[in-house]
Amino acid sequence: MSRIGILGGTFNPIHNGHIQMAEYSHDAAKLDKVILMPTFAPPHKESANLASCEHRLNMCRLASAELPYAEVSDFEIKLEGKSYTYRTLQLLKSQNENDDFYFIVGADMFLSMQNWKNPEIIFRLATVIAIPRDDDSVSELKEHYDNVLKKMGAKAIILNHSVLTVSSTYVRDNIDNGTALENLIDSRVFNYIKENNLYRV
């Protein structure tokens, strides 16, 4: 039996905030493995200037290369279509029924999970790990859990510390300004983006 964290996202591109989410979740929940799982198509938004699946997988592999417990999976990409968390967890659980799954989300996602497709299935199949946007949002997350998600059957671990504040949009918009991205993305990811001429208008 393994404790497996799932960190999904567009990863367009992956940045150091994503990596911190994996690290903090691994340590807090004593996870055996954290799987970075790029979506084929995110259901909640249309992602402008979306890099190919191959590029996004490669960038995830580069960014997580020094995390011995991290894996990069093309599971949702192979499913194609919109990536719904409940369906992904159903399939993963059917293939690994003895493992315990932990679904890792940021604050904004956690605060909207009651509106996701079939959230009760998500809550039945995985414990949610919520990561605050800043120190002040911890109480907001706990209140939302107590008043909304817990009543829907959710189990949650709410971390007490936030991750680096950065967005993939900011990275894309500043890819020609390496100084602006210093410490925000892995240097190998930055070089990959440049070498492959990604995110050019």
Image (cartoon, rainbow, N blue to C red):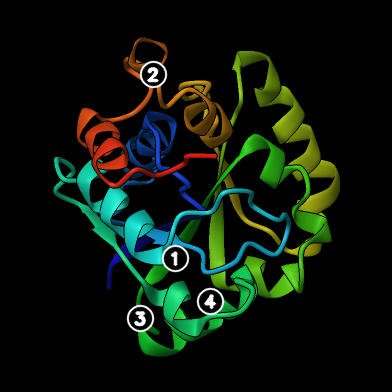
Q: Mark 3 highlights which residue? A: 98
Separation of residues labelled 1 and 3 (CA atoms): 10 Å
Name the residue nearer the viewer: 17 or 158. 17
Separation of residues labelled 2 and 1 (CA atoms): 33 Å
Separation of residues labelled 4 and 2 (CA atoms): 32 Å
Chain-order first, disc 4 or disc 2? 4
Q: Nearer the viewer, mark 2 or mark 3?
A: 2
SS of the residue at dot 3? loop
Q: Nearer the viewer, mark 2 or mark 1?
A: 2
Label 4 Cα crowd, 10 Å radius (few <14 / some 14-19 / many 20+): some
Q: Mark 4 highlights which residue? A: 88
**Quarter residue 6 falls in:** bottom left
Separation of residues labelled 2 and 3 (CA atoms): 41 Å
**Quarter residue 198 falls in:** top left
Query: Which label belongs to residue 181?
Result: 2
State whether residue 181 is above or below residue 179.
below
